[in-house]
Amino acid sequence: MNKDFLKIENLSYKFNGVSAFEDVSFSIAKGDIVAIIGPNGSGKTTLLKTIIGLYEPHSGSILIDGQTPKIGKHLIGYVPQKFEFDRLIPITVREFMDLERCGQKKHSGPNITKALAEVGLKDSEHKKLGALSGGEFQRMMIARALLHEKDLLIFDEPSTGIDISGEKTIYDLIRTINEKRGTTCLIVSHELNIVNKYAKTVVCLNKRMVCFGRPEQVINPETLKNLYGIGAGLYHSHK
Amino acid sequence: MLEILQYPFMIRALLAGGLISVILGWLGTFVVTKKMSFIGDGVAHASLAGIALAILLGWAPIPTAMVLSVFIAAGIYFLEKKTNLSGDMAIAIIFTMGMALGVVMLHFYSGYQPELISYLFGNILAVSWTDLKAILAGGIIILGFLAIFNHRILFATFDPIGAHLSGKKPGLYDLLLYIATAVSIILSIKLVGMVLVSALLVIPSAISRLFATSFKKFIIIAVIASFLIVVLGLIVSYYLDLPSGATIILFGGLMLLLSYLGKSIINKARA
């Protein structure tokens, strides 16, 4: 197993001279499910966008399977918190999933159907993208990553705006993909109960790295007070 | 009907209009998807600087405006991407700067410039054989670009982060889309006029969006609607002896209205 599938060393990023996060270092093993937690404005989303190469780090390095983001970014499937688009534009699920092949005949129809079936969207390929609910859209994004055989799936608060049952469906799906395919998953989440239930590793970020470890080691009143500045905890901690 | 084909100016107008309509209909689907409908107005108005420069120096206006339009498109792109200005702010700045520059330059031109009105509102008689050759050459290059890079442009337009991750350089395709749109707008100016031309980017897509069930059909219906609007608008303008640009746009507006009515009737019948 590659223990340094995603390796981040001394990473810092500044917005107009103001630090978004600094001196962040951690490694993720292949096949891990890692959750990044932290308060609003702690740099979580900026860190994800730096990992996927949208932002150039101020200092430090990122290696994805030994490659810089510029070269290794094709290994990444990214599911944003909110995908902004005009819901009246008549693009179908199938067309959207097929965008990456850019007209090449690499993926035939059955592969798209299969990927959609894997995320529970069996008969959705001819639906318009704008007709999907929030939960269906996130699952479709996961299906697209499966179709293109991404090795690292990055989720930025994947259950934002989704009800409890939709949230459970998405996280169960993430776990199933991780177990069946060995896909490495990196998730930003505010939901400590979800993190505790699904993540194998937790990174606590508040401009700097506050903690790193297994959920049972990290999610405790003392660490959470350091991270959020107030007493926080789990409503229940059953796995 | 065939009577109008006896006139060379009408043949030139129909050939130029037919090609331009296909291009603007196609480009419009991306422009509308990107919520950049204002770009057509911005480029067309800013091109007054190029037209004025050409009039002042005695150069050919359309080629001069075409070259300038590439810089206008690049200017909008760089203002949008490299500063914290939004797309509409970038367009508004370039739009007004170009117009202001054009007005100042025309101030130094002594004498009446009747052709200027043709550039503002379009003139069916104004498309010369030289213009037609420029429109055909420029139009075929843009059509080729759209045909070859259609999927990449859509990927960059609809999902720039996904395009970035798969190494498709969304910024490059955005820039090329802006340039293709700007050049197409200039190619259409003599027929439709700089004040009205942006409607041809938006109206066909607005019609198509009502009926299309996929992006492929969105493009096809927009191209057909655009072709019908321009060609039928030209024919109507000939028979009613009306200004070509304004007639084309009004005809487009009427088609959009009828499309909305048709769509609501279909929806009610299905309910």
Image: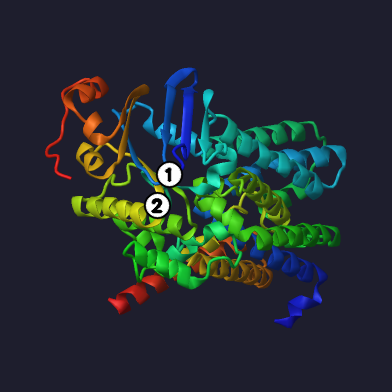
Residue B104 placement (x, y as % from top left) = 72, 31
Is residue B157 something one can see in this rendering?
yes
Residue A97's disc number: none
Residue B103 in the image: above or below residue B66? above
Residue A30's disc number: 1
Residue lying at the far right of the rendered structure: B58
Q: Are marks 2 and 1 in contact (CB under 8 Å)?
A: yes
Is residue B212 something one can see in this rendering?
no
Residue B83 in the image: above or below residue B38? above
Q: Which sits in the foreground, A64 or B233?
A: A64
CA gap between label 2 and label 1 equals 7 Å
Looking at the image, which residue is at 30% across and 31% down?
A213
Looking at the image, which residue is at 25% across and 29% down?
A218
| Chain bearing mark 2 | A
- Local packing at callout 1 (Cα closer than 10 Å; few below 14, some 14-19, many 20+) is many
Residue A62 in the image: above or below residue B155? above
- Residue type indicated by callout 2: Gly
Quadrant for the C terminus of chain B, please.
Answer: bottom left
Residue lying at the far front of the rendered structure: A1
- Residue type indicated by callout 1: Lys
In the image, taking residue A6 as reference, residue B71 lies left or right, namely right
Looking at the image, which residue is at 28% across and 47% down?
A159
In the image, taking residue A106 as reference, residue A182 lies left or right, namely left
Residue A106 placement (x, y as % from top left) = 57, 65
Give the residue number, with chain letter if any, for mark 2.
A182
